């Protein structure tokens, strides 16, 4: 049924040159196992896998999705409603520069194999739920640096590299 609605929205989109929120096929759900009330409900567009919003009610999740679409539109061209939107990965150029450091860091700090996951230039310690004081202290001890506030892994690796070459 979702795909039928998506196809209808797709076909209708050819009658317009610009699309609004209402032109996209909408899906909503309730996550009964959510531990936080503000993410209990979700909303997304059919066939646009990673464009998701949450809220403490269905209407709040939809409103948040609408806000996200407005923000997205400011920087990007909107895909045709109902079309399949491929996943786009963030660049990993900076991470690749520090691959040797990353391999050691993942083994020492995160405790997983670097090659078992995808890491982009925007990946951070919080992606691994390691943005706590204990992890920061471990980084200080192991590498002699104090990670900057955003805790982006690429920035941490750059700090480690700069410390090593100083």
Image: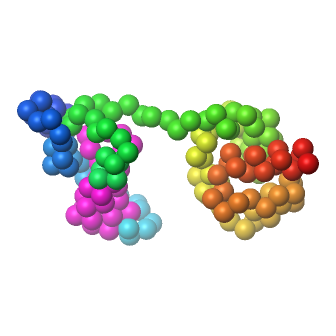
Q: Which residues are magenta?
A: 39-68
Whether residue 122 is visible to the viewer of this picture, yes or no, is: yes
Tell me the quadrant of the picture where the N terminus can be found: top left
Whether residue 47 is visible to the viewer of this picture, yes or no, is: no
Position of residue 7 measured from the top left corner of the image (x, y, whole percent)? 15, 31
Position of residue 104 measured from the top left corner of the image (x, y, whole percent)? 81, 41
- Count numbered badges in the picture: 0
Residue 18 within the segment the image draws in magenta: no
| Left or right for 85, reference 92 | left
Instruction: Determine the image quadrant of residue 79.
Output: top left
| Left or right for 158, reference 83 | right
Position of residue 105 measured from the top left corner of the image (x, y, whole percent)? 78, 45
Q: Which of 33/80 is in front?
A: 80
| Left or right for 78, reference 118 | left
What residue is at 42 percent from the left and 34 percent from the top? Answer: 87
Instruction: Determine the image quadrant of residue 48.
Output: top left
Establish if 36 lies above or below 13.
Answer: below
């Amino acid at each position: 049924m979702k795909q039928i609605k998506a196809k209808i929205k797709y076909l209708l989109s050819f009658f317009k040159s610009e699309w609004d929120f209402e032109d996209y096929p909408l899906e909503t759900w309730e996550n009964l196992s959510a531990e936080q009330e503000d993410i209990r409900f979700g909303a997304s567009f059919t066939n646009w896998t990673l464009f998701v919003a949450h809220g403490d009610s269905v209407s709040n999740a939809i409103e948040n999705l609408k806000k996200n679409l407005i923000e997205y539109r400011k920087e990007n061209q909107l895909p045709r409603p109902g079309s399949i939107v491929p996943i786009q990965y963030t660049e990993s150029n900076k991470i690749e520069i520090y691959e040797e450091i990353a391999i050691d860091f993942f083994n020492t700090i995160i405790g997983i194999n670097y090659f078992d996951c995808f890491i982009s230039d925007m990946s951070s310690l919080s992606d691994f739920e390691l943005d706590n004081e204990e992890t920061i202290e471990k980084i200080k001890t192991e590498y002699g640096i104090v990670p900057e506030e955003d805790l982006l892994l690429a920035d941490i690796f750059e700090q480690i590299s700069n410390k090593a070459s100083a």
